[in-house]
Amino acid sequence: MRKVNLVYGTVYGNAQFVAETLQEELLAKDIQVTLMTPETLNGFVPPEDELLLVVTSTTGQGDLPDDISPWFETLRGEAPYLPKLEYGVVALGDSSYETFCFAGIRFDELLTELGGTRIGELLKIDACETMEPEVEAKAWLTQWTQLINDHAAD
């Protein structure tokens, strides 16, 4: 399987913890992964021969976390064409808000606009229903990596 670039945006640390857990899972499967902290995203354009996995929480009224918002805005402003990029999104949110998981939805929409292809479903993790978002994310990751492998075999 191709290398995975794992990007996260967090407010209180939950999305970072989920991203770190997914990093450990990928490494355990012998999949090369780079966990990119928000500080390392300046100028980063996802390579199309690698996979992108975005883990983000939602804050305020459906806003992106402050730590990942500059990268999102740069991607949106520069709009690099990424037709061969394959990606996944894990969104953390609270379903008691109308803007549930909106930061992840915005990332999904942006990456699609840039020509990327989402592999699998966008995972929405509800803070109202789960106290351990990493458990849901790990189960989703198993399916995601299988879909990637199946897609590569086509």
Image: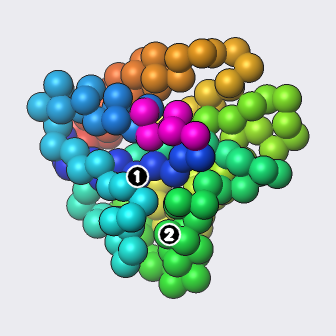
- Count every numbered label the image shows and give the total: 2
**Relative to 136, residue 71 above or below:** below
- What amino acid is labelled 2 in the image? Trp
Q: Position of residue 141 (x, y in %)?
A: 38, 28
For disc 1, the marked residue is 7
Residue in the foreground of this view, choosing between 61 and 30: 61
Q: Residue at x 25, y 29 (%)?
A: 24
Residue sitting at x 29%, y 48%:
35
| Quadrant in which the N terminus is drawn | top left
Mark 1 and mark 2 in contact (Cβ < 8 Å)?
Answer: yes
Residue 39 lies, in percent from the top left, at 39, 64
Q: Which residues are magenta?
A: 12-17
Q: Main secondary structure of the magenta part?
A: helix
Which residue carries the number 2 mark? 71
The image shows residue 105 at horizontal and vertical percentages of 66, 49
**Residue 76 inside the magenta-drawn segment:** no
Q: Residue at x 36, y 55 (%)?
A: 37
